[in-house]
Image (cartoon, rainbow, N blue to C red):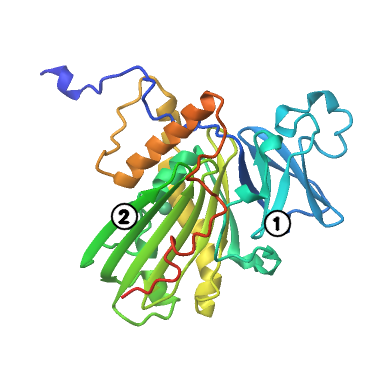
Amino acid sequence: MNSKVDAVPSRQKLATDWLPSNFDLRDTWFAVAHANHVSARPIKRVMHARQCYLWRENGTPVAAEFHPLHMAAMKSEYSEFTAGSGYFPVAERYGYVWVWYGNPANATLDLLPQIPFLPRDGSSIPAYMRTTVRFDGCSPLSVENLLDLTHADFLHGEVVGGEGEAESDEVEYSHTSETLTRTRIVTHKPVSPVMRWVGGVRAKYQDFRSTLHVHLRSNLCISYPRFRPGFDIPNVQPFVPSGKYRSRVNQIFNLQAAPLPFRHIMPRMAYVVGPQDNSVVRPQTPVYLSDNAPRDLHSRFDGPGARYRLLMKKLWERQQNGDFSYAGDADPGADIAALLGMDRALE
Ligand SMILES: [Fe+2]
């Protein structure tokens, strides 16, 4: 027997390879914590293996490199991320505490992403619409997994339902140098089980449009699924990179439009769906880091996925060359309501 047929050829990593855990992109806001989790008592969060302590002073959030009790003693360890001050630029908006990761001199509130379906003052967001899920993989792999809409059919089928029987199923996407927007439009698909059981949707079939808007530097994913008959399930998933093998997602839903039982149950689904995603993401990061890994079978015909990799590599190259600026086509604070399809009806 010819052993060449069976053997997976080992190969050295190339400069052009997709190395998702390498993207330590700077000059961006990370939604590191749910705002209601930040109190007078300090908590610790991690951004790219860099620790960050959060607490409130007179109600205002503070983000520092060390625990407040150790700040004075650790003065010689203050880093470039706080320009030697020990304190990160910090902001509170949309129910999150945001910390600037990069050069503090470049931090500006204009670069906070706009989230059109969440109140800017997030204090009215109920606690049950918030979840936290941890993933054992680097953030870009989770974003890729989310971009790949077909994964939901086989991974979360019993929750969201397979779309296999739909009349039509189309994907479109657009991008800037800092964002990728992907929309999937499905017509006449069987109503998803969760919508039938707790969503009160009695129809057999429904139309579905789901837009995902990704901020590339921060891995912040803004998701806007619309079901008709049915309702909208807008939610935010910021994949904050804790390190090369870990990310943490503080998800917020806005389920004001959903019926009552669904409103309470949907956010809990994150604890079912999250581990399913994690089972796929967990083994991947080490494989990408290994020289003898099997070939990455990513398809060039997956338009949004291929574009995502290209845009991430471009950003990374620019930053490697010392360019941390936002290009003219990029405005994280721009109004994306129309882009998400919030004001569009589904026929
Ligand atoms: Fe998923």
Name the image quarter holding residue 131: bottom right
Q: Image quadrant for the N terminus?
A: top left
Q: Is residue 100 left or right of residue 2?
A: right
Mark nearer the viewer, 1 or 2: 2
Instruction: Name the amino acid, label 2.
Output: Glu
Task: Give how far across and how far down residue 234 sits, in percent.
Answer: 49, 65
Looking at this view, name the residue that lies furthest to the front.
Answer: 328
Quadrant location of the C terminus?
bottom left
Callout 2 crowding tier (Cα within 10 Å): few <14, some 14–19, many ≥20: few
| Residue depicted at x 23% and y 66% | 166
Query: Disc 1 marks which residue?
Result: 35
Most distant residue in the left direction:
1
Label 2 SS: strand
Where's residue 91, x and y in %?
Answer: 71, 50
Near-viewer residue (170 or 42): 170
What kind of residue is marked 1? Ala
Residue appearing at x 29%, y 65% in the figure? 186
Number of other residues with Cα within 10 Å of mark 1, as a class: few under 14, some 14 to 19, many 20 or more: some
At x 22% / y 64%, what residue is drawn? 168
- Which of the two residues, 89 or 163, is positioned nearer the viewer here? 89
Asked if 182 appears above or below 219 in the picture, the reply is below
Q: Position of residue 237 (x, y in %)?
A: 53, 53
Q: Which mark is residue 325?
A: none
Q: Looking at the image, how many numbered discs can be counted on the residues?
A: 2
Q: Which residue is mark 2?
A: 172
Which mark sits nearer the N-terminus, 1 or 2?
1
Alpha carbon distance from label 1 to label 2? 34 Å
- Give the image location of residue 209, x and y in percent: 36, 65
